[in-house]
Image (cartoon, rainbow, N blue to C red):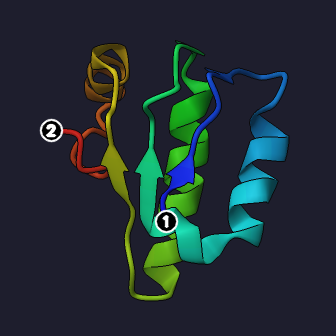
Amino acid sequence: MPFLLPSSVTQDNVLQLEKDGLLNLATLRVIDCRNLKDFDSTVLTVLLAWQKKLQADGQQIAVQNAPEKLIVLAGVYGVAQLLGLS
């Protein structure tokens, strides 16, 4: 079962979201972005933190249903390939 991101990921909720994800590492292998509508670059921060944690365990995340804005943002920050968004 994938980890479903909320519709909004901003500075207001990113720390709690990161903690929730780390408590559910088994579901972090697949991140579903279908609900993601309102976000800024903080979403990249949390995705990269989860990726780093999983890589330490020899795994990595797969991002599904990424909105075009997220793909562009990841490209601008140079992390699209790290997140499998390129």
Badge 2: residue crowd in 10 Å (few <14, some 14–19, many ≥20): few
Which callout, 1 or 2, points at the residue further toward the start of the chain?
1
Residue under the image location 26 percent in, 38 percent down: 80
Q: Amino acid at mark 2?
A: Ser
Residue under the image location 35 percent in, 48 percent down: 63
Q: Amino acid at mark 1?
A: Met
Residue 49: % across, % down: 59, 56
Residue 69: % across, % down: 34, 14
**Residue that sits furthest to the left in the current view:** 86
The answer to whether one can see residue 20 in this image is: yes
Residue 41: % across, % down: 54, 22
User: Which residue is disc 1 drawn over?
Assistant: 1
The answer to whether one can see residue 53 in this image is: no
Q: Image quadrant of residue 4?
A: top right
- Residue 3 or residue 83, whichever sits in front: 3
SS state under label 2: loop
**Relative side of 61 to 81, left or right:** right
Residue under the image location 39 percent in, 80 percent down: 59
Q: Is residue 8 above or below residue 14?
A: above
Q: Residue 86, which numbered label?
A: 2
Residue under the image location 33 percent in, 31 percent down: 66
